Image (cartoon, rainbow, N blue to C red):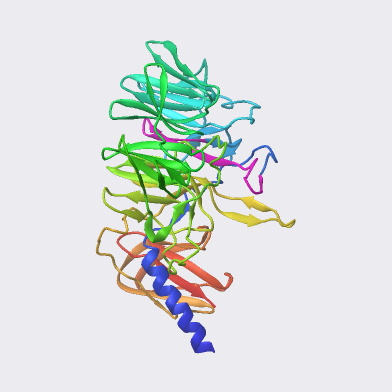
Amino acid sequence: MKLKKISVYLFLFAVYTQFYSQMWVPATPYPGANGGSNNENYSVYFWGCGGCPFVSNLKVYENELYVGGYFNSIGGMVAHNIAKWNGTNWSTLGPGNFIPDDLSSSCTDIEIFNNELYIACGTIYKWDGITLINTGYVGNELNAINNELYIASSNELYKYSNNSLQLLIQDNTITFYSIEQYNNNIYLGTDHGLFRYSNGALIDCNGITNTTPIINDIQSYNGELYCVGAFLSIGGISVSNFAKYNGTTWQNISLPNGYRPTMLFAVGSPHGNNHLNIIDSKLYLAHTFFAPANPTPPVGSETGPVVEFNGTTWNTSGLSINHPPWGLAVEKYNGYLYSGGYYSMTNDNLGNVIMLENFIRLDNQISLNQTTEQIKPSLYPNPTSSEITFTSDKFTNEPYTLFDQMGRTVGSGKLSGTNTTISLSNLSKGIYILKVEGAYESAIVVKE
């Protein structure tokens, strides 16, 4: 029985070593975004996650990463719905709080226009790096196209240029979620599917559908328009919440191992318009991914909160740190891939689920479809009940970090010489991930 148990651990070790070459971890050593309508210190999760803090949009501006969503503090600092991160410290946008005493709406979008940052949270704010200005305009979705700023506010579409706001169209039967330029036309993702705006009118692009499609985010990439949301049919074909449009016909998009974006948060979602982003000529999708019921994907093939498309195939960009990972946004900053959403959870003494992390970072920026020579550290004994020794003739005081399966740091130090022994006596039984700085593969440590 003991031998069988060890064999299972070794199998898991091999699987996790293969797929944990990348791992999502808390983005900073500080607390994630906290607050919301339930409690000033933390929020209790329930289905639909009403009241839970989240990060739903990320934007790099003036060499800082702006983080928006629904929260009243982040990194131990009071900040309402938006803050900025410089890779070391958090700060607010000017003195005081961003939106004092207003937690009824979230920061839904951030866009750069005319070298200034525009922030949508019901009201549109403008930030030049020094001063925050309330423009007096309203909106939830922004996109700078051809030296003009397009603003969607529920059922109205505006164009802002030369300090003037022009109403393009109002339709009380449709809610606008996202704006994108494709083939020199303006397209809109809505709660009634995809529309093209033309000369004051909306042109329906949905074709034949079984039910009304909901499209939360759209992105032009490689000559096609990618759409994600809640829809199982569009253009006369069956789809799985993710499809692309070439201006005439639709095509379903299949993700690795049969995974698909879930419909969760799609209906009436105020924070679902930042799922797609082009980074380094690749298309990234941050979302909640569900596995097919049949056939069951192989162990270790689970997708993380983000997947990437290289122009030919989709690849997972990291293994999930928990289940389920709810990705809402993705951006690259200072060489790292960051994702915002709803992540690590734990239970309180009343059985409620508490949100711990909603801003995470991909620890290793090597895509799974790339090949890079890395050193594999030797560990023994593994599994272990008390301590483990790392051996290599290449250790030169490399820092190491030990993570649990929730991505939390449970140990750290430096590896030197040919042997370094680490005590695991204070850790619970389970699987842990070892990350060594430099050209080392991540490794799995099993505590019996």
* 88 or 216: nearer the viewer: 216
The quadrant in which the N terminus is found is bottom right
| Image coords of residue 23 (percent x, y) | 42, 58
Q: Nearer the viewer, residue 253 or 446?
A: 253
Relative to 106, does residue 145 appear above or below in the rendering?
above
Q: Is residue 105 left or right of residue 195?
A: right
Total numbered badges shown on the rendered structure: 0
Q: Residue at x 25, y 61 (%)?
A: 372
In the displayed structure, 197 sits above or below 46; it is above
Q: Which residues are magenta?
A: 43-68
Give how far across and how far down residue 49 sits, in percent. Answer: 62, 45
Q: Is residue 88 visible?
A: no
| Image location (x, y in percent) of residue 5 | 51, 83
Position of 183 with respect to 101 (left or right) is: left
Q: Residue at x 59, y 27 (%)?
A: 97
The x, y position of residue 92, in whole percent, is 52, 30
Does residue 285 appear in this view? yes
Residue furthest toward the right? 350
- State the image quarter where residue 59 is shown: top left
Taking 53 as reference, is 25 above or below it? below
**Residue 95 belongs to magenta span:** no
Q: Is residue 161 above or below residue 432?
A: above
261 or 98, which lies in front?
A: 261
Q: Which quadrant of the rendered structure holds the C terminus?
A: bottom right
Q: Is residue 37 left or right of residue 127?
A: right
Residue 61 magenta: yes
Look at 42% across and 48% down and name the residue there: 239
